[in-house]
Amino acid sequence: MYQQNGNFMAWIWRGLAAFLLGGSLAGAQEAAFRPPAVPLVTFDPYLSVWSEADHLTDDVTRHWTHRPHALISLIRVDGEASRLMGDEPSSVPAMPQTSLEVTPTRSIYQFANAKVRVTMTFMTAALPDDLEVLSWPLSYITWTVQSADGAAHDVSLYDSTSSELAVNKNDEIVACGREKAGNLASKVTGGLTVLRAGTEEQPVLGSSGDNHRIDWGYVYACARSRQCDSVIGGNGALLESFVRDGEVPGQDDSRLPRPVTDQQPVLAFLFHLGAVKSKLVTRQVIVAYDEIYAIKYFGTNLRPYWRRNGATPETLLRAADKDFARIEKRCAEFDRELLEDLTRAGGIRYARMCALAYRQCLAACGLAADSGGHPLFFTKENTSNGDIATVDVFYPMDPVWILLSPSLAKSSLVPILSYAASWHWKFPNAPHDLGTYPFAPGRDDGGEGMPVEESGNMLLLCDAICQEEGSTAFVSPWWPQLTQWAKYLEQYGLDPENQLCTDDFMGHLAHNANLSVKAILALAAYGDMCQRRGDSESAARYAQLAKADAAHWLQAANDGDHSRLAFDKPGTWSQKYNLAWDRILGLNVFPPEVARTEVAFYKEKLEPYGLPLDSRTKLTKTDWSVWSATLAEKDSDFKALISPIYDYLNQTTKRQPLADSYVTTNLNSTGFHARPVVGGLFIKMLAEPREWKKWANRDHAKVEGWAPLPGAVKP
């Protein structure tokens, strides 16, 4: 039974939020989280729409590059219009937003006035144990409306999707149209109304870059035909019609194709809900994107993974609509269980940050299929330089997939492993990246000056996958490359020369103590894989080598109550985030006192909004800071190190997807954001062996046997 008292309802929603985030009293007492940006319609670097505001009505919705990608929703109640999403029309008041909750697969907004309550839910079916559904390039937008005062109210909803979603620049010419509803009929829905927009030129895989959007393929918006009216038209004219009359034109705009700048063509739906009482009334729009081809991989255009078996937008949308109820239930169960486990592992603040990171991590990657239909997972370096398949980007990202979807973790490694094994690569160390997203032609450049970094990254990630699977079957095709990288680190890893590490924005550094930790642990990880392959002699040799190198490190890096930034720089310090793998992989190379000493020192160096990366700067990296916090043995120490990050995200004036770099003394600072590296926030869960095993064992894909690299045979 619903009460009319607004304070009571607010209490109910706070209780629901606390339940979603662990159900603890501590969770209920923690103030609501204000994300710097809220994921709305997200899938990959191109379909990535966010709200960069406190309220969904404060600003236009935006692509992660901050470019407007307008999704608009209005509601009319008894003839009076209000805004639910977007800042247009400015003359129409916003319905008060009463709450917001972000879970791993959903962003849930609550609105209410004296007459009605509205819930808007944005759901991306990012189920890590189901690659088929996870690969769907779409999000569901669902409205649930009910009377707030017990009386019946006449309610209509308006929703539009801008053609901005299908262009890189707004002067590009777009064509809009309809799919035949009959082709999408089903016994469940009676048919779908499907609208689409795309550039007239269609330069498929014709351009690349960092601050770049897609201008090939088509954006789709669809709804159940029997529940809606639909129209394609100019944004301003449709908004004016709905606000004035509660209707939209009965015919599509005939003045197409035209540039987006010319009265902004949109795909719009009108839902007449009729007399709404206390019974919940629900309506839904699906926003999807068909890239046609996703990645240019060594000269071969790869299909998106969802298209690998001949699926089309028609079959995609039909399946998404038909299976919604089942998928919604699975998403709710996944969110609940994962958030409970995250809260147990690191507290409610940690759980909330991970929930925000989860969809961002996916939305910064592209999932394609190789010639055999196997998944290939490509990261994009959003806001840094747009590189594709960068080793020191998927190295911090992959903890989330090693935990939740080892098949995706493997799929992120395969392109680099295959490239390193091909005639293209002539260097003894691991590559750095494969190009600029979505082009992956290989660089052939020796590794962008990060030879120790990338070689260590690959060995550590490969061992993590082998440990999870209890087998080295995955790495066997590339064992010669892993051996070569181990030999390289044996020669150059203990005391690295003047070179870059993943923190390349800090410049070159010789004798880097944290980089040496990575190399030492990578050698131990290689030895662990040797042992699993039955090569006891090599296993013993590399285990002994790692121990000897660690003993040398303890002396060279010692600076009293902490370790140095570089062996030759007394009075310096740095986060030793790479040390996290020692405990996670059970390598036990460094004495436990090393981590204890580091954590105690980090607590002394905390700034208001986090732990600086090292003694040269006040800048921090969100991902590395959580890795460093994972060194803590005490729950209180872990929370002490990650709470300032939460404070920054909760209070920063920089409205953007979750930042992985910022200045720890400045709420107005900004840096890298919208990047997949935030998947690294999940590393704390890998330090919980039972949780790691529980989640990883749900990966039903168990993918093996990837197709050869295109052009693997030298011409």
Image (tube, grey):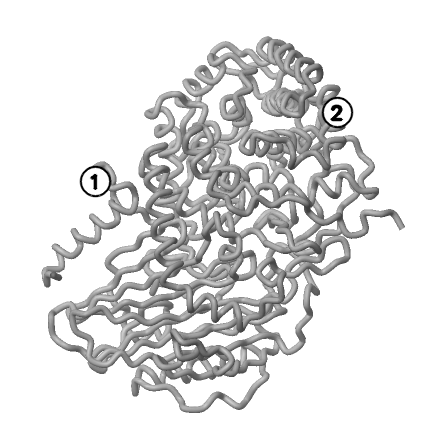
- In the image, residue 61 sits, relative to residue 647, either above or below, namely below
Q: Nearer the viewer, residue 549 or 91?
A: 549
Q: For residue 106, which quarter of the picture?
A: bottom left
User: Which residue carries the number 1 mark?
Assistant: 29
Give the quadrant of the N terminus.
bottom left
What is the secondary structure assignment of the residue under circle 1? helix
Q: Which circle marks residue 528 in the picture?
A: none
Query: 700 and 114: which one is in front?
Result: 700
**Total label count?**
2
Instruction: Give the amino acid at mark 2.
Output: Tyr
> What residue is drawn where x is 27% and y is 72%?
93
- What is the x, y in percent for residue 235? 44, 79
x, y percentage for residue 15? 20, 48
Residue hosting label 2: 488
Q: CA distance from mark 2 to mark 1?
A: 52 Å
Dot 2 crowding, Cα within 10 Å, few <14, some 14–19, many 20+: many
Q: Is residue 91 left or right of residue 612?
A: left
Q: Nearer the viewer, mark 2 or mark 1?
A: 2
Mark 1: amino acid: Gln
Image point (70%, 42%), residue name: 416
Q: Above or below — where is 135 with respect to 220?
A: above
Q: Is residue 512 visible?
A: no
**Residue 438's image quarter?**
bottom right
Indicate left or right for 154 with 612 as reference: left
Residue visible at 21% across and 40% down?
A: 29
Residue located 51% across and 72% down the image:
220
Q: Position of residue 594 (x, y in %)?
A: 49, 14
Callout 2: SS = helix
Crowd band around label 1 with a 10 angstrom C-alpha radius: few (<14), some (14–19), many (20+): few
